[in-house]
Image (spheres, helix red, strand yellow):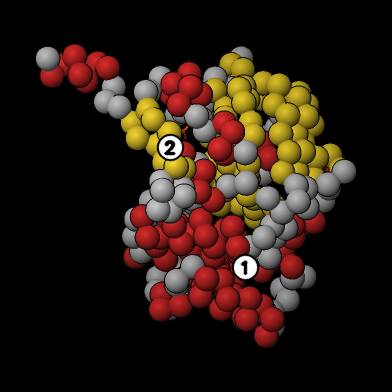
Amino acid sequence: MDLHLEGVEINIGTKKIVHGIDLSVFQNSFVALLGPNGSGKSTLLKAIYRVLEPTRGTIYLDDLSIDQIPAKKIAQNMSVVSQFQSNSFDMTVEEVVMMGRIPHKRLLEKENQRDLEIVEDALRKTGLLEYRERNILKLSGGEKQRVALARAIAQCPSLMILDEPSNHLDIKYQLEILNIIKSLNINVLSALHDLQLAAQFCDYVYFLHKGQIVCHGKPEEVITKEIIKEIYEVDCEVFRDPTTNNLCISYYKPINQVLMEV
Ligand SMILES: Nc1ncnc2c1ncn2[C@@H]1O[C@H](COP(=O)(O)OP(=O)(O)OP(=O)(O)O)[C@@H](O)[C@H]1O
């Protein structure tokens, strides 16, 4: 399922949070939404997963405006990993991941062999097989994050929306999770903070600043020292690591910190 946003504006109260957003995710690409704290990333994602309603503009899933599509059909195609998962149920990991199958079931229909296999596969992909009987309430933040991703994978979506999927994870799991997301080979839109990881895993990136898209393109085209300086007000060098060939960012100390030390 492709995602297209045309002229999306979102006001909260009288405050304009995002405006004039045109954005597309198609051809099974992994697209990053980048930008500083408070730039509007979560707000925009919330409109896509229908927690907020845009004040203006249209969100299309394939060729249909999202408000013309039944909720169940959206849930069969789009899964969401939001920043603050409300995994506060007294359930096992496996039960939570099985919830990802609900959109594909009729009311009160029991899980079948295929559901069990899909859940097993999602648990395996996220390194959670050993956790399947564990109570969700007793997991660490990073483990809960992986459960949320496993549930989203079990939903078998063709479009995944993620808000900082790796923010609680150590570097090994950050790399693994981003690798898993990429290998799903579906359309993905993810808010990310780590520019280097975005460059490493994403096909395309959008930079959001003060509620507007200021530039977009392939990571190597737009993750530049000039753009980082303009958007984040931080000096850095951007270069290719000769061994890994990854785009790397080396940040200078903030100017005020240097002054404090003088
Ligand atoms: N319910 C709300 N009421 C008022 N202001 C809000 C509300 N939700 C978000 N905002 C404001 O909208 C702006 C964008 O917030 P948002 O959470 O979308 O940013 P973000 O880019 O996701 O930030 P972060 O990287 O810190 O998660 C912020 O200034 C925030 O304070």
Res. 153 visible in picture: yes
Would you identify the image quadrant in which residue 186 lies?
Answer: bottom right
Q: Which residue is mark 1?
A: 154
* Residue visible at 46% across and 77% down in the picture: 129
* Residue 88, label in figure: none
Q: Residues within 10 Å of mark 1 (few under 14, many from 20)?
A: many
Q: Residue furthest left?
A: 262
Q: Is residue 46 visible in the rendered structure shown here?
A: no
Q: x and y percent of residue 246 in the render?
A: 46, 48
Q: Residue at x 44, y 57 (%)?
A: 175
Q: Nearer the viewer, mark 1 or mark 2?
A: 2
Closer to the camera in the image, 104 or 215: 215
User: What residue sits right under mark 2 in the picture?
Assistant: 239
Q: Position of residue 221 (x, y in %)?
A: 59, 33
- Is 54 on the left or on the right of 209, as rendered? right
Relative side of 77 to 124, left or right:
right
